[in-house]
Every structure is written in C-alpha cells, then in structure tokens.
Amino acid sequence: MLIIVRKDQSKIVMGLLSYSPNLPDILAVQREYDWYQSDDNRDILLWRDENTHHFTVLLGVARVYNSLVIRRIVFSPEVQPKQKLKLGRKIYQALQSQYPDQVIMGSIATQKFVTKWRDMQ
C-alpha cells in the first residue's frame, strides 16, 4: 500500500533516507527531508508491505505540470534484490491509481527503474 507521509512519520522517513548512498550523513538526510517538506508539489511516499506492515520503500516525487516525477527510490535492506523489480511493478501500478491524470516518469537517476516497471505492465 502506498501512502503519503504525515508529519509524525519523520523518523521513518529519515531512517529510510539514511540508506541512500548519496546522503552520507544525518545533515544531508535532514536537508533532503526538509526539501520535500518545503513545497506542496513535492511528496514523500512510503510503501507498506502487505504481510509485515513494515515500510519497505520510500519514493520522493514531484508534481511538475501534468507529470509525476519520481526523484528518489530507496528500498529498505529487508527487500531482497530479486524482489525489487516485482515490488517496483506493484508500486508503479499504485502510483497510476493514485495519480490517474498524471504521466509517471523518472528523473535522470531513476528513469531506468521507472522504464522497467512500466515495461512489465
């Protein structure tokens, strides 16, 4: 299940963001979190595993014109590499349902994943 982050979930978000290799310390993680919170056109979405009810994936998205741009994808360590593609497809389908009037696309960093997810449709 895909949910938009609430203010009281900041610790969960910070924990998942800390798994990003390009966010080397807590200050970088905090800046990234603050950046998403500073604009109503940006959201952090969390994927809740249906079986464990753990938050296992974080998506950083931005709404630009008629598009939803996936800027950041972070999988928790409990997601096995072989599960990522199948899980990504579920997330893509959930995004299509949640944002039916927007084109879902990736940033330069995430487009290859978004394309794989889209091609699995």
Image (cartoon, rainbow, N blue to C red):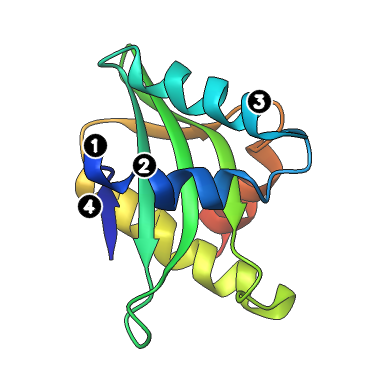
Residue 101 x, y percent position in the rendering:
21, 32
Residue 117 to residue 105: above or below: below
Q: Nearer the viewer, residue 87 or 18?
A: 18
Residue 18 in the figure: left or right of residue 31: right
Q: Position of residue 104 (x, y in %)?
A: 42, 36
Dot 3 or dot 4: first in sequence order is 3
57 is higher (above) or lower (below) than 11: below
Question: As shown in the figure, which amino acid type bears the numbered disc 1?
Answer: Lys
Question: For residue 81, what is the image quadrant?
Answer: bottom right
Camera-side residue of 41 and 107: 41
- Describe the element under mark 4 as helix, strand or loop: helix
| 22 to 45, vertically: above or below | above
- Circle 3 packing at 10 Å, graded few (<14), some (14-19), many (20+), is some
For discs 4 and 1, the disc positioned in front in the rendered view:
1
* Residue 105 percent across, percent down from the top left: 50, 33
Answer whether labels 2 and 3 touch (C-beta < 8 Å). no
Counting residues from the N terminus, which is met first, the one under dot 2 or under dot 4? 2
| Distance between the alpha carbons at the discs numbered 1 and 3 | 19 Å
Say whether residue 43 is left or right of residue 3: right
Is residue 7 found left or right of 111 in the rendered image?
left
Task: Identify the amino acid type marked 3.
Answer: Ala
Q: Which residue is mark 3?
A: 28
Q: Which mark is residue 7?
A: 1
* Residue with the mark numbered 4: 97
Q: Quadrant of the N terminus?
A: bottom left
Number of numbered discs present? 4
> What is the three-letter code of the residue carrying label 2?
Ser
Whether the residues at callouts 4 and 1 have beta carbons within 8 Å, the answer is no
Sequence order check, earlier mark of 4 and 1: 1
What residue do we see at 29% from left, 30% from top?
A: 102
Structural distance between the alpha carbons of marks 1 and 2: 6 Å
The answer to whether mark 1 and mark 2 are in CB contact below 8 A is yes
